């Protein structure tokens, strides 16, 4: 996963906070890690969905056709 590095950085910060008894920071970093996972998963999932139009309720679908525009 190309975005896993950010989760690793947050985990390093959590370990630092724990080691130095920074309990509020540790708690906040736990929340931050959970949020990062949710947003990264959402970003990955949305990359597999069709493009959405600019107006609510509109969808644009990319049609991939064969040579010469024949499907």
Image (cartoon, rainbow, N blue to C red):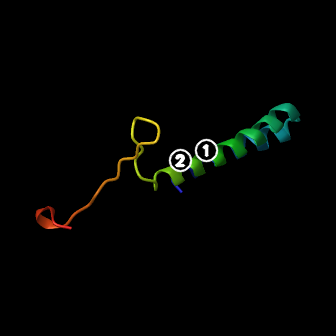
Left or right for 21, reference 32: right
Q: Where is residue 23 in the image (x, y as percent from the top left)?
A: 88, 35
Looking at this view, is 13 or 55 the one in front? Answer: 55
> Residue placed at 61% from the left, 44% from the top?
39
* Residue 43 image point, x, y percent: 53, 47
Q: Do the residues labelled 1 and 2 touch (CB within 8 Å)?
A: yes
**Residue 7 at what x, y percent from top left?**
64, 47
On-image quarter of the C terminus: bottom left
| Side of 71 where 44 appears, left or right | right
SS label for mark 2: helix
Observer-nearest of 15 and 62? 62
Disc 1: which residue = 39
> What residue is rendered at 22% in x and 63% in y?
65
**Mark 2 closeness class: few <14, some 14–19, many ≥20 residues within 10 Å:** few
Tell me, for residue 68, which label it has, or none: none
* Total residue callouts: 2
Above or below, comparing residue 24 to residue 71 in the picture: above
Q: Nearer the viewer, residue 36 or 43?
A: 43
The residue shown at (65%, 47%) is: 38
Mark identifier at residue 43:
2
* Element carrying mark 1: helix
Q: Which of 52 and 10 is in front in this view?
A: 52
């Amino acid at each position: 996963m190309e975005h896993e590095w950010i989760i690793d950085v947050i985990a390093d910060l959590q370990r630092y906070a724990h080691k130095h008894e920074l309990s509020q920071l540790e708690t906040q970093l736990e929340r931050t890690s959970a949020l990062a996972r949710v947003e990264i998963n959402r970003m990955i999932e949305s990359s597999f969905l069709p493009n959405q139009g600019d107006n609510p309720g509109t969808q644009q679908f990319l049609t991939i056709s064969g040579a010469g525009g024949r499907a």
